[in-house]
Image (spheres, helix red, strand yellow):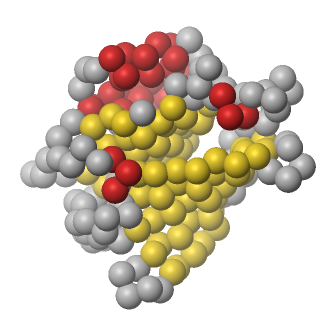
Amino acid sequence: MHLYWQGNYYVDNYVDYTKNLSHDGKSIEWVVAFNKALENWTYPDFSVFLPKGVKAPTQITVQDHWQNGKIYSKTVQNTQWHYDWKSQKTNFNQEFDKFPGYTGWSPSLDKFYKLKNDGKFSHVLVDTYGRQSHTYFSHKMVWKFKTELEEGYKDKWDKLPFIAGIKQNNPLAASFPSYKGEFGE
């Protein structure tokens, strides 16, 4: 499901993801790619909303894929901002409103809000690029991480809701909020 407000409707250019069940069947392995089109963004924010039924990742591999073919990779313990639905609901709701909520009303966004309000999301991961160093973003970024499945969700791993996206964060530029997700079952 694609959510966007303005700009190119082909959201896969800006955010795409895959998920696979780990070999031992205990985790989901996520790969989230931002800006495959290599367009220029002004201080973008990246966000991922994880489903209920998974634990927060314990580490995230962040890869910067530069236009010259070089890949810079680092592993971080978490994103700059991260909130839990149960214990940090106010912060979680603010991030939801600020990111996918910024795309404007649509039947799809309405359904995602219902899922959120029903507690179907568990964690949000948020990071930014370039604001402190005043650097523009024009390369592809990939986040790779695992989320351990909680009891009762191991046979539902491919039926869980998920949203990931990118949004410019500069008052002098259009935001171009672009999100991709699935409702689950």
Instruction: Identify the residue at horizontal 60%, vertical 72% (top origin).
Output: 74
Instruction: Identify the residue at horizontal 24%, vertical 26% (top origin).
Output: 104
Give the percent coordinates (x, y) of residue 154. Answer: 82, 32
Give the percent coordinates (x, y) of residue 101. Answer: 33, 28
31 relative to 80 in the view: left or right? right
Give the percent coordinates (x, y) of residue 14. Answer: 35, 54
Q: Is residue 86 visible?
A: yes
Eyeballing the image, is 71 above or below 13? Answer: below
Q: Residue furthest left?
A: 172
Give the percent coordinates (x, y) of residue 177. Answer: 28, 42
**Camera-nearest residue between 97 and 110:** 110
**Camera-nearest residue between 8 and 89:** 8
4 relative to 172 in the view: left or right? right
Q: Is residue 98 visible?
A: no
Q: Residue furthest right?
A: 24
Quarter of the figure that contains the N terminus: top left
Eyeballing the image, is 71 above or below 44? Answer: below
Q: Place residue 105 in its image quadrant.
A: top left
176 relative to 146 in the view: left or right? left
Quarter of the figure that contains the C terminus: top right
Instruction: Identify the residue at horizontal 51%, vertical 63% (top origin).
Output: 142
**Camera-nearest residue between 72 and 152:** 152
